[in-house]
Image (spheres, grey):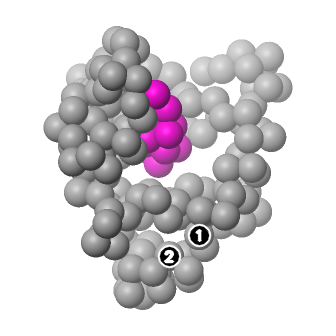
Amino acid sequence: MPSSAEAALGIVCPEAALINEAGNHLGELLIPAFGVAEILGDDEMLSADAFSDLLGVSRVTVNTKRQSGQVLGLDGAKRGFRFPAWQLDQDGRPYAALPRLHEILAGAWAAYRFLVSSHGALDGRTGLDALKRGRDADAIAAAESVARGDFR
């Protein structure tokens, strides 16, 4: 549970609580309140309609894929779910490792943070860079490390 000072500095994303494989709660992910609007307002963040058009599927299918962790959909207070366009591979399909990353990191916001952050276990690259390079196993191992609290 964040302190009142932490809560004042950011918002808690309960769906992004970090939980390790043993089911131990590692804490909620705090995203600065001012950062959420900027993240969701980025040009690469698509509405459900735009993302469904990009995938060539219905909005219902996008929502189903979001709920199962097959695509990354970030919930915002005012804008509804937004979908990063960069989560699609060169063939226009969601990266195959996304469901596993979503599961390991216990939520969309935690998966997002993992994908856009540099990790020592990935030689200083981001999780997304690893996926783009076809290093799914390395990205999954790094996510497991983060979930365990290794933070290397």
Label number found at residue 51: 2
- Where is 111 relative to 83, above or below? above
- Give the amino acid type for the residue marked by disc 1 in the picture: Leu
Residue depicted at 39% across the width and 44% down the height: 128
Location of the N terminus by quadrant is top right
Residue 19 in view of the camera: no
Residue 38 at x, y = what percent? 75, 50
Sequence-first tag of 2 and 1:
1
Q: Report the predominant secondary structure element of the magenta stretch.
A: helix
SS of the residue under disc 1: strand
* Residue 77 magenta: no
Residue in the picture at 40% in, 23% down:
124
> As shown in the figure, which amino acid type bears the numbered disc 2?
Phe
Q: How many marks?
A: 2
The residue range painted magenta reads 107-118
Dividing the picture into quadrants, the one containing residue 92 is: bottom left
Residue 42 position, x and y percent, is 68, 58
| Other-residue count near label 2 (Cα within 10 Å), few / some / many at <14 / 14–19 / ≥20 | many
Q: Position of residue 7 (x, y in %)?
A: 75, 26
Q: Is residue 36 above or below residue 23?
A: below
Residue bearing the label numbered 1 = 46
Contact check, label 2 and label 1, Cβ < 8 Å:
yes
Query: 10 Å neighbourhood of mark 1: few (<14), some, or many (≥20)?
Result: some
Decide if residue 93 is on the left or right side of residue 34: left
